């Protein structure tokens, strides 16, 4: 490529030199007429190639940055519409950077949207509706994976989905074998008992049956109790879709189970201040029997914390053993969007079509960057190559829950209340009543102001979501 560019540059210089020679000082004699009239314009004009349409693409993702850069380079080299895309990865203050860019009229053309910024970005007018660009084939391809408040707002599509993270119980196979346990727990009671047995079996090596990263309230809540609730058929964020109200009573048994493991001494000491990476490091060393997390773990153990143990992953346990819902994918929904400020919307859509092509999405899935949300991509793909990913692959019990309303609640939020109870106990019934009251008051306020438009879904059935990813 470099040599070819040198040849082109040299050729261009020769053309300019020859043109200069033929026209002298710009007032050469026209021999045909014998006058000093300037030569015809056509004989001196040098045709230049049209300037490329340049698109800026911003992302906060780090795990797939190398792959995305390779895909962009391929697009830049092969597209026939003279488009050039430049990728910029922002690892910190991404949302604030986007805000500043829009306020100063310097917004990127392509924006990585996420579950946390999708609604704010739509409300601020940052995103271009995609409906008018999509043909029938693209609409059919993504129809089953589109979620209101995640890909769509007020009936308009602002971002198409790509991938998510499945939720699993990750367990130390070696410690399970040492404790004489042949399979991961299927119920909450099983989980409590298995944690106790693993702790007993691991005494000689300082291992404990269970761990959770309580330092990050939202992170630990979404990876652990949420996944148990959703697989049990309960809204993972306390919102009851059938009634359109918050009801955290479904978490009662889950909260009791976590407190029991803490009281039994089955949890790794110091979970109150434990973050996710130190937890992973301890698991890799064989000091933890099991924990709940997502399908990002195989890459973590491949690149950051090489394990000294054999480990695997299974569906989270449920409250009673009955699978009444689906384990909701985490950080899923939107992916790429077009900026409302870009002057090159047509070219931006051309790039999005390329990024959402079967080839790009299939390779994304097969190389283990994320688990596809599209059944047809899963069906035509090979299983991801990454070691340890097998236990995280989509099953009929994985799926996409509707988006719970976002409210600003007064007092302690539920994730922190969950942690407080698991560590210190308290009057659980009173806690549940109080948190229900506060969340529903916030919900009523948000509905009255128009910030929340979600209504009750009397026919909602969590079991109906089973099989949505794997047919």
Image (spheres, rainbow, N blue to C red):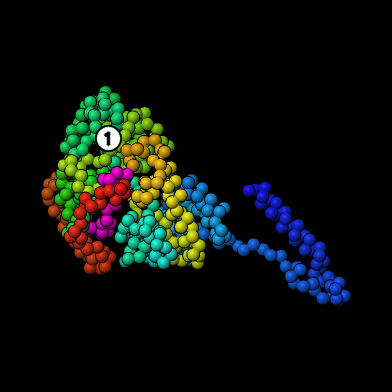
Q: Is residue 28 visible?
A: yes
**Observer-nearest residue: 373 or 106?**
373
Q: On the picture, is 89 further left or further right than 50?
A: left
**Observer-nearest residue: 150 or 199?**
150
Picture coordinates of residue 204, whole percent (x, y):
26, 23
Answer above or below: position of 228 versus 283.
Answer: below
**Observer-nearest residue: 447 or 85?**
85
Q: Residue at x 25, y 68 (%)?
A: 449
Q: On the picture, is 264 further left or further right than 169?
A: left
Answer above or below: position of 129 versus 14.
Answer: below
Residue that protrudes farthest toward the right in the picture: 34
Picture coordinates of residue 331, whole percent (x, y):
34, 50
Quadrant in which residue 315 is drawn:
top left
Quadrant in which residue 35 is drawn:
bottom right
Q: Residue at x 37, y 31 (%)?
A: 307
Name the chief secondary structure element in magenta: loop
Quadrant in which residue 294 is drawn:
top left
Q: Residue at x 53, y 50 (%)?
A: 74
Residue holding disc 1 = 290
Q: What's drawn in magenta, residue-wise?
A: 394-412
Q: Residue at x 20, y 42 (%)?
A: 318
Residue that protrudes farthest toward the top in the picture: 204
Picture coordinates of residue 132, whole percent (x, y):
41, 67
- State the SS at label 1: strand
Q: Is residue 304 magenta?
A: no
Q: On the picture, is 83 further left or further right than 300?
A: right
């Amino acid at each position: 490529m470099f040599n070819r560019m040198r040849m082109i540059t040299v050729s261009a210089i020769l053309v300019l030199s020859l043109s200069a020679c033929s026209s002298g000082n710009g007032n050469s004699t026209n021999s045909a007429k014998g006058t000093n009239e300037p030569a015809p314009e056509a004989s001196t004009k040098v045709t230049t190639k049209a300037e490329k349409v340049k698109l800026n693409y911003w992302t906060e993702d780090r795990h797939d940055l190398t792959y995305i850069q390779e895909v962009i380079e391929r697009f830049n080299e092969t597209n026939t519409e003279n488009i050039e895309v430049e990728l910029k990865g922002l690892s910190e203050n991404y949302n604030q950077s986007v805000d500043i860019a829009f306020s100063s009229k310097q917004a990127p053309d392509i924006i990585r949207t996420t579950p946390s910024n999708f609604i704010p970005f739509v409300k601020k007018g940052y995103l271009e509706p995609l409906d008018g660009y999509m043909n029938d084939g693209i609409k059919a391809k993504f129809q089953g994976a589109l979620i209101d408040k995640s890909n769509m707002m007020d009936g308009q599509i602002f971002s198409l989905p790509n991938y998510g993270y499945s939720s699993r119980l990750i367990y130390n196979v070696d410690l399970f074998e040492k404790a004489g346990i042949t399979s991961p727990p299927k119920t909450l009671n099983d989980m409590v008992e298995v944690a106790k047995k693993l702790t007993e079996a691991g005494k000689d090596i300082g291992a404990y049956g269970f761990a959770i990263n309580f330092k990050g309230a939202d992170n630990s809540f979404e990876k652990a109790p949420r996944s148990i609730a959703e697989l049990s058929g309960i809204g993972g964020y306390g919102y009851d879709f059938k009634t359109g109200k918050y009801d955290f009573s479904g978490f009662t048994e889950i909260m009791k189970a976590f407190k029991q493991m803490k009281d039994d001494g089955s949890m790794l000491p110091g979970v109150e201040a434990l973050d996710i990476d130190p937890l992973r490091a301890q698991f890799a060393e064989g000091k933890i029997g099991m924990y709940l997390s997502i399908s990002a773990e195989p890459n973590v153990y491949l690149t950051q914390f090489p394990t000294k143990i054999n480990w695997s992953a299974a569906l989270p346990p449920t409250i009673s053993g009955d699978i009444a819902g689906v384990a909701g994918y985490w950080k899923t929904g939107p992916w790429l969007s077009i900026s409302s400020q870009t002057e090159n919307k047509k070219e931006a859509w051309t790039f999005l079509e390329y990024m959402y092509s079967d080839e790009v999405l299939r390779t994304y899935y097969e190389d283990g960057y994320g688990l596809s949300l599209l059944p047809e991509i899963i069906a035509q793909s090979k299983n991801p190559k990454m070691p340890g990913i097998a236990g995280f692959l989509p099953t009929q019990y994985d799926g996409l829950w509707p988006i719970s309303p976002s409210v600003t609640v007064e007092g302690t939020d539920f994730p922190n209340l969950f942690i407080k109870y698991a560590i210190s106990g308290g009057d659980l019934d009173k806690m549940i009543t109080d948190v229900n009251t506060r969340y529903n008051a916030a919900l009523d306020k948000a509905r009255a102001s128009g910030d929340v438009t979600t209504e009750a879904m009397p026919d909602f059935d969590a079991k109906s979501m089973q099989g949505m990813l794997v047919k």
